[in-house]
Image: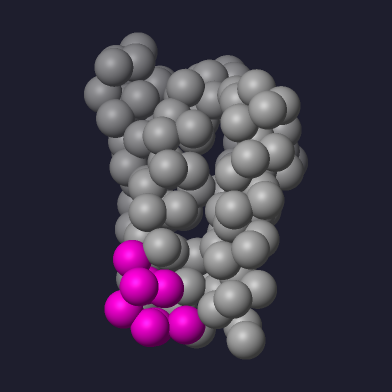
Amino acid sequence: MFRRTRTALAIEQGRAMCLLALDRNADAQQAIEAMIRLDPSFKPAEDDTPPKIRAVFTDVRRRMLAGVLQEVYARAKQAYERKAYDEAVAGFGEVLALLDDPDLVLDAGPRADMRLVAKAFEDLAKA
């Protein structure tokens, strides 16, 4: 699974770069959205990605990240309810990592609430 995700990310990243070069911003944003859904923590490397592409990527990521966070949380909670505890621990760990992401646009109150709940579920799943 990991290898397929990395391959899909590379394909979508190349697609986004080509579309941005062709000034097809809406299509490029769709490619970036696909990348964020595949791996919400992915960010293009600063040393080999042009600033224009990084800026577009950051804008799309900021717009999407709160919704993706909710999806990751929902999947982790479903895994917990199915008693797939290893999957739940990984999912809640991803939620906690996303809550620390500087691109996440979320007020402090909801962020703290989600952190508390995700950490509690992660601890329960580990137990």
Exactly how many numbered labels are in the figure?
0
- Residue in the image at 61% along x and 31% along y: 110
* Position of residue 125 measured from the top left corner of the image (x, y, whole percent): 55, 78
Is residue 40 depicted above or below 5 in this figure?
above
Is residue 123 depicted above or below 76 in this figure?
below
* Position of residue 122 measured from the top left corner of the image (x, y, whole percent): 60, 69
- For this view, does 31 lie left or right of residue 126? left
Colouring used for the render: one colour
- Residue in the image at 37% along x and 54% along y: 74
Locate the C terminus and report the quarter of the image it occupies.
bottom right
Residue 53 in view, yes or no:
no
- Residue in the image at 68% along x and 28% along y: 109
> Which sits in the foreground, 83 or 101?
83
- Residue in the image at 49% along x and 34% along y: 65
Q: Is residue 103 magenta?
A: no
- The stretch in magenta equals 78-85
Locate the N terminus and report the quarter of the image it occupies.
bottom left
Q: Main secondary structure of the magenta part?
A: helix
* Position of residue 89 measured from the top left corner of the image (x, y, whole percent): 55, 74
> Which sits in the foreground, 70 or 36?
70
- Which quarter of the picture shows residue 13? top left
Is residue 9 depicted above or below 110 in this figure?
below
- For this view, does 35 lie left or right of residue 65? left
- For this view, does 86 lie left or right of residue 20? right
- Which quarter of the picture shows residue 36? top left
- For this view, does 120 lie left or right of residue 76? right
Residue 94 in view, yes or no:
yes
Q: Is residue 79 magenta?
A: yes
* Position of residue 15 measured from the top left corner of the image (x, y, whole percent): 33, 39
